[in-house]
Every structure is written in C-alpha cells, then in structure tokens.
Image (cartoon, rainbow, N blue to C red):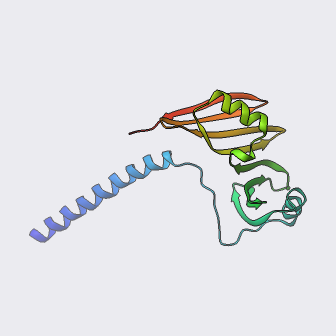
C-alpha cells in the first residue's frame, strides 16, 4: 500500500517539476537575444571570400560566422577590430569598426568634447551601412556614463546612466 502511494507521490512531484520547468523555459525564450551561430566548420562560398578580399585586402585573423543566411567576418586591420556582414551573394550589408578616441575624426571628437566637457571617451564604434556613417561613442565621467551617436555631424544622446556608489 505504501509503495503505490510513494510512486504516485514521486510521479506527482516529477510532473509538477516538468510543468513548472516548461513555463520557466517559455519565459526565458522570450527574453533571449539573437545569437550568432558558429560551427566548427563554416562553409563560406568562394564568391563571398573573393568579395571580402577585394574590400578588405589587409584583413588579418579572419573568423567567419553565420547569421541566418548571411556571413559575418570578424577581423582586424592595422590593429583595429572590425566586423563585416555579407549576404550570400557577397554584397556588403554593413561594416563596423571598434576603436578609441584617437580613431575619431577631429571634427567629431571636438564636437563631442565640447558637449561633454567632463567626460572621457572610452570607446568609439563606426557603423557603415547603406551609404551612412554613424559613430556610436561611449563616454564616462565620475558620476556616470553616456552613449551618443553622431551622424552627419549631428550629435544625439542615446542613453545616460548614473554610477551606483
């Protein structure tokens, strides 16, 4: 009599655990961000490699990843980290360059420094896409952080954060 009761009790516990686990997974799936898939071997078509070489002849340490049907190349040129996304036909979708204050054009650096006098520029990312060049610049001072974007010499504050002390 106790054995069927114990097995039913444990069966009930397992069922509850499975049901609650499935609800927990459902919530976490909704919160997941898009993920790059990276296999041990990524087949990159010859036309994509050829177009990439034409655009980035000095590229070093090239790694390939897939995003949906597109191909992301992570590489460096002259010590500057870069990313380029190409479609299956080898056409460039966007290019990103990750740098520091010294990589900013002088006029953009001056504009940012004028608007954010007490802030230090901690990083600068150039996004080039569809004939657009957008700088995304991270700033920091003793009280917080700011993210600004600059396109066509127009400065826009994206976000500002306060440091927690």
91 sits to left or right of 103? right
Tell me, yes or no, if residue 24 can be seen here: yes
50 sits to left or right of 104? right
Q: Which one is nearer the viewer's eye here, 123 or 34?
A: 123
31 sits to left or right of 90? left
Quadrant location, the N terminus:
bottom left
Give residue 40's position: percent from left, percent from top.
65, 72
Quadrant location, the C terminus:
top left
Where is residue 18, by image quadrant? bottom left
Give residue 141's position: percent from left, percent from top.
53, 37
Asked if 105 appears above or below 116 in the picture, the reply is below
162 sits to left or right of 86? left
Where is residue 72, by image quadrant? bottom right
Tell me, yes or no, if residue 1 can be seen here: no
Give residue 147's position: percent from left, percent from top.
60, 36
Asked if 157 appears above or below 57 in the picture, the reply is above
Residue found at x 72% / y 68%: 42
Which residue is outermost to the front?
118
Give residue 118's position: percent from left, percent from top.
57, 33
Residue found at x 49% / y 49%: 29
Q: Which one is nearer the viewer's eye here, 27 or 65?
A: 65
């Amino acid at each position: 009599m106790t054995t069927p009761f114990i097995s039913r009790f444990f069966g009930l516990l397992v069922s509850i655990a499975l049901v609650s686990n499935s609800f927990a997974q459902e919530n976490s799936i909704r919160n997941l961000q898009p993920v790059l898939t990276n296999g041990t071997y990524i087949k990159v078509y010859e036309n994509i490699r050829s177009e990439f070489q034409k655009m980035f002849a000095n590229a070093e340490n090239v790694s390939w990843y897939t995003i949906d049907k597109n191909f992301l190349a992570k590489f460096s040129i002259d010590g500057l980290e870069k990313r380029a996304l190409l479609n299956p036909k080898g056409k460039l979708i966007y290019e990103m360059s990750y740098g520091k204050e010294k990589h900013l054009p002088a006029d953009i650096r001056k504009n940012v420094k004028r608007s954010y006098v007490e802030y230090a520029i901690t990083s600068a990312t150039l996004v080039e896409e569809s004939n657009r060049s957008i700088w995304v610049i991270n700033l920091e001072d003793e009280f917080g952080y700011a993210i600004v974007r600059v396109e066509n010499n127009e400065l826009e504050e994206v976000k500002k954060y306060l440091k927690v002390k």
